[in-house]
C-alpha cells in the first residue's frame, strides 16, 4: 500500500470513530434534550424519585398556597396534575391559570420540589408543546398567535 493509501485509510478510520462517538453522545442525551415534561409525561414515564427535570404546564386555579417564602401549587396539563413546592421569590408574571416551567427534582411521594420557577414572558406566547396539549384537550382559545410564535411585526405604510 502506498503512502497516500495509508493516509486515506487513517483519515477514514478517524472520521468513523468521530461519527460513532457523536452518535453515542446523541443517543445518550435523547431523554435530557427535552425542554420540559408535562404532568402526563411524568405520570406515564415512571420518573425515578430524585431525578432532575423540568416540569411545564398551567398553574391550576385555586391551588396556590403561600406560607412565608414557601409556595405550593399544582401544575396541570388537563389530564394529570403534579403538586409543586418552591421556596423563594416567584416571578412577577406567576399567577393561576398561566403557563409555568419549574426546574427541580421529583420526590418519593410524587410531588415536585422546584429549584427555580419560570413564568411565561408574554400573554400571547406559549410553548408549542403546551399549546398542542391544550388543543388536543379542546382548551385552546382560538384567535391567539400560532403556538410558539412571537407576535407579528408592525406593518409599515408603503414608502416609509
Image: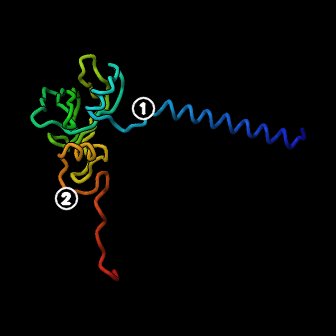
Question: Hey, which residue is sitting farthest bottom in the picture?
Answer: 159
Name the N-terminal-most of marks 1 and 2.
1
Picture quarter containing residue 78? top left
Q: Nearer the viewer, residue 11 or 156?
A: 11
Residue 114: image location, x then y, percent: 27, 28
Question: Hey, which residue is sitting farthest right in the picture?
Answer: 2
Look at 74% across and 40% down and name the residue there.
12
Describe residue 121's horizontal placement relative to residue 67 as left or right. Answer: right
The image shows residue 2, relative to residue 151, as above or below, that is: above
Q: Which residue is mark 1?
A: 31
Q: Quadrant of the N terminus?
A: top right
Residue 129: image location, x then y, percent: 31, 43
For marks 1 and 2, give the CA distance.
Answer: 33 Å
Look at 42% across and 32% down and name the residue there.
32
Look at 14% across and 39% down and name the residue there.
96
Residue 8: image location, x then y, percent: 80, 42
Which label belongs to residue 49?
A: none
CA neighbours of label 1 inside 10 A, class few (<14), some (14 to 19), many (20+): few
Q: Quadrant of the C terminus?
A: bottom left
Q: Which secondary structure lies at badge 2?
A: loop
Q: Which secondary structure lies at badge 1?
A: loop
Which label belongs to residue 143?
A: 2
Amino acid at each position: 500500500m502506498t503512502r497516500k493509501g495509508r493516509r486515506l485509510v487513517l483519515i477514514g478510520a478517524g472520521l468513523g470513530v468521530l461519527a460513532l462517538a457523536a452518535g453515542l453522545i446523541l443517543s445518550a442525551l435523547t431523554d435530557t434534550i427535552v425542554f420540559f415534561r408535562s404532568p402526563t409525561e411524568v405520570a406515564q414515564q415512571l420518573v425515578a424519585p430524585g431525578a432532575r427535570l423540568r416540569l411545564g404546564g398551567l398553574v391550576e386555579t385555586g391551588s396556590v398556597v403561600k406560607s412565608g417564602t414557601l409556595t405550593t401549587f399544582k401544575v396541570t396539563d388537563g389530564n394529570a396534575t403534579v403538586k409543586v413546592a418552591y421556596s423563594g421569590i416567584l416571578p412577577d408574571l406567576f399567577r393561576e391559570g398561566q403557563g409555568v416551567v419549574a426546574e427541580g427534582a421529583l420526590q418519593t411521594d410524587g410531588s415536585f420540589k422546584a429549584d427555580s420557577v419560570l413564568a411565561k414572558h408574554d400573554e400571547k406566547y406559549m410553548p408549542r408543546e403546551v399549546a398542542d396539549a391544550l388543543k388536543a384537550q379542546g382548551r385552546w382559545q382560538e384567535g391567539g398567535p400560532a403556538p410558539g410564535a412571537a407576535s407579528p411585526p408592525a406593518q409599515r405604510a408603503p414608502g416609509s
